[in-house]
Amino acid sequence: MKKLMYKIMLTCKQATFYSSVKSFKKLKLVHRIQLKLHLSMCKSCHEFDHQNQIIDKSMTDFYKGKHLYSEEILSEEKKSQIRTTVNQHIKG
Amino acid sequence: MHFFVFHSKTIYIQIVAKKQPFICEPNIWVDEYSDEFFRFAIYRVKSREVAEDLVQETFLAGLKSLDKFRRDCPEKSWLYNILRNKIIDYFRKKTNQEIKRSSAVVETDDDSFYGQFFKKEGQWNNEATQENWDISADKIMERDEFMQFLILCLSLLPEKWAKVFSMKNIDEFSTKEICKELEITPSNLWTIIHRAKLQLRGCLEKRWHNK
């Protein structure tokens, strides 16, 4: 029985592995179940999984350019300065 | 024909690219994009001057590498890519010293890397136990700050690791395409993702949560 338990139960290292890669690939059913089982019993890995989701979501926001809260715009002065520089480079 | 279109993203892109390549017009860049890029940058770097410089540098870098513009995506996305890399570079430079230290840790062999987090039997180290972060998506200030640290921590990862995430999120590459591009096997890729996540989480815990 003990041996069987060891076979079914993931270690924390394995659980964090499946938790990390699951946004990249669909896990096999058996791994999904093993992960779920582990997460339901291990508080640390449960937190890791939750934090992982926060990281994934925020990373997508960063790369996709969402969350533009700021109302700031460039000053006309700076803008025309950039325009001049860019135009110089286009000609040059 | 339709069969191929639906079954292969690459072929689809090629067909679209052949029919109507995207054009690049540097003359309109400043008027069209500078405000949006500036907002994108200032939100992340929190400094007017730095953000202004980054916008200008982005346009100049774009002009320099015009020949690399592949015409398979709009120029705006292409420029956004450059800007994003500039922001990451900015944080990288800012923390140059720390990188040297952290990459030394990160590039070590398997045992000493995982040893930071796990015991030999695969359970968490006592020092690495997880605490509840308690961050909610709707509290903007909180997320704002969190994002700062996330970008900082991303900039501390080895370049190849960070590239995996940008390829997945920006280019929406499949894992197969990512492996091909980085010349690694799928199991290498899973290991990189696992390590990167452990490292990112640890970095955020240390810098953002426990500060």
Image (spheres, rainbow, N blue to C red):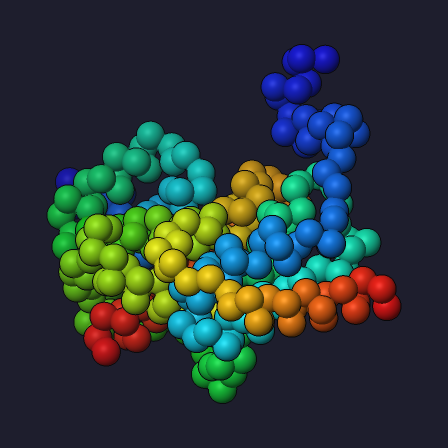
View extreme (front): residue: A76
Residue B114 visible from this viewpoint: no
Residue ID at (68%, 65%): A83
Q: Is residue A18 left or right of residue B142?
A: right
Where residue B117 sits: x, y (%)?
31, 68
The quarter in which the C terminus of chain B is drawn is bottom left
Compare residues B112 and B189 and report the one nearer the observer: B189
Q: Is residue B197 left or right of residue B172?
A: left
In the displayed structure, would residue B136 be above or below residue A23? below
Where residue A26 sits: x, y (%)?
41, 34
Residue ID at (39%, 54%): A68
Q: Is residue B164 left or right of residue B28?
A: left
Residue B1 visible from this viewpoint: yes
Where residue A48 sits: x, y (%)?
25, 56
Residue ID at (21%, 75%): B210
Compare residues B38 and B92 and report the one nearer the observer: B38
View extreme (right): residue: A92
Q: Is residue B147 left or right of residue B42?
A: left
Compare residues A28 and B25 and report the one nearer the observer: B25
